[in-house]
Image: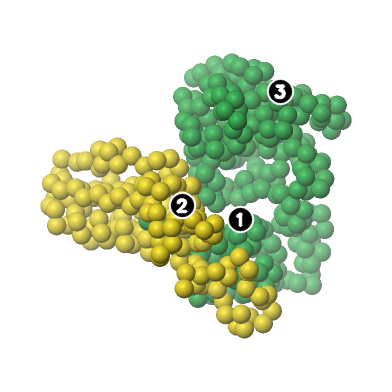
Amino acid sequence: MNRFSLQERALEPARLLEQLRHPSCGGYVAFEGAVRNHNEGRAVLRLEYEAFAPLALREGERILAEACARFGLERASCAHRVGALQIGELAVWVGVGAAHRGEAFDACRYIIDHIKHSVPIWKKEYYEDGDSGWVNCEHCAAAPDSHESTPAPHPHRAHGHS
Amino acid sequence: MSATVLNGLVLAGGRSTRMKRDKAGIEYAGRPQLERAMELITPLVDGRAFVSVSAEQRGDPQRSAYATIADLTSNLGPIAGIQAALHARPADAWLVLACDLPFLGPATLRHLIEQRARGRLATAYRSRFDGRPEPLCAIYEPASRASIEAWIAAGETCPRKWMSRNDVALLDLPEQRALDNVNTAQEYQEASASLGVAGGDAISGASTLPQRRRVNVRYFALLREQAGRGAEALQTDARTPQELYAQLQRDRGLQLAPQFLRVAVNDEFGDWLQPLSDGDTVAFLPPVAGG
């Protein structure tokens, strides 16, 4: 049984793990991703996650199914928060159950890596200095001369992590 | 089956400062929104349908053609209308509806009623944009009254936040666009064009521009901020997502280079060069950062 979900409220790891349990599993591995108070050298106060829900759910389920097939898992589940989160709050939980520990460790890593890479969820960080920014997006501006009719770069996006 | 009566409540209490005219009187397909919303809701509820009004709007002729419920508290926004309804008929449940949802049809409301979770405080749809609850097309059970009154007493006014923090059942929308909102005059014009009325290009431009198609565009994260909106319906002669994005970079000031983005068509990952069809929903996805 796979389950990828987007959640508005605090994640409850104990409950999520309980839902994963199955008599055929000899090993469980869970990963908890939490909101960190710094990123790329800047102090982070809080953040917001935004998701493209229908596609995120479908893509999340696809990753879980792929992990089950690839590692021969019995169970895999992932819950991801959306909305405003404070420092220390859980942003993502991944849990897998397998017959043996080896596949469980490998599959858990595989799932979180792929979720970070391809599920349409975005993260906005709010920094201590009052600035804010969308993670992974701030260096993606089109070169100003590549679109002649495009206005000058948006002023509030002019900052960078340089 | 519970014997709880389900009434309808159409929210038309706002003074609509953003639209610069009274929202209840704006017309789609030639009918004021309020009339359209009341016609939509009335046959679907087993109780009565009411219009929510602020105290000052009580004598307004358009509104007083219907049964009304006046807010008990001023300047709280939509939550005051919901509170007043739960207060007026405390044993009943309420199907609450904003009057400015031009794409909403009966199927979405029927689905909400069928899937209603009577044991929870309310039943609502998840926003197709951010997954959060949509409080203004939702069913509020009698049991929600105490919680909403406590919420207001605590100085809170946001019904979406109330839903997020309380025991509310959330459903996925059966019709994706059903709750797309119309809040600015520009969005209003585009929505009218998309519905094929009021001099929209669907009629006047059809013979001269046979290539034009209606598409819905969704923006997320940094692109949403740059576009200044989460979604829009527009007429375009772009044949592919690539051409559409180039147009929007120009028209909406989008700053991200397309090579960093992925494209989704009708809620599936798509291709930059696939042909666009009339009615397609196109989303441009900035680099993701989950986890």
Residue A72 visible in the snapshot: no
Residue at image location 38% in from the left, 46% down from the top: A89
Kind of element beneath mark 1 = loop
List the residue tagged with mark 2.
A45
Q: Chain of mark 3?
A: B
**Toward which corner of the image does residue B107 lie, by quadrant?**
top right
Chain appearing in green on the rendered image? B
Residue A42 in picture, x, y percent from top left: 44, 62
Q: Which mark is residue A123?
A: none
Q: Amino acid at mark 3?
A: Leu
Q: Residue A66, located in which quarter of the rendered image?
A: bottom left
Residue B230's tag is: 1
Identify the residue under disc 3: B72
| Label 2 with label 3: CB-CB less than 8 Å | no
Question: Considering only order in the chain, which callout, 1 or 3, is on the residue closer to the N terminus?
Answer: 3
Colour chain A is painted in = yellow
> For the residues carrying marks 3 and 1, which lies nearer the camera in this image?
3
C-alpha gap between disc 2 and disc 3: 38 Å
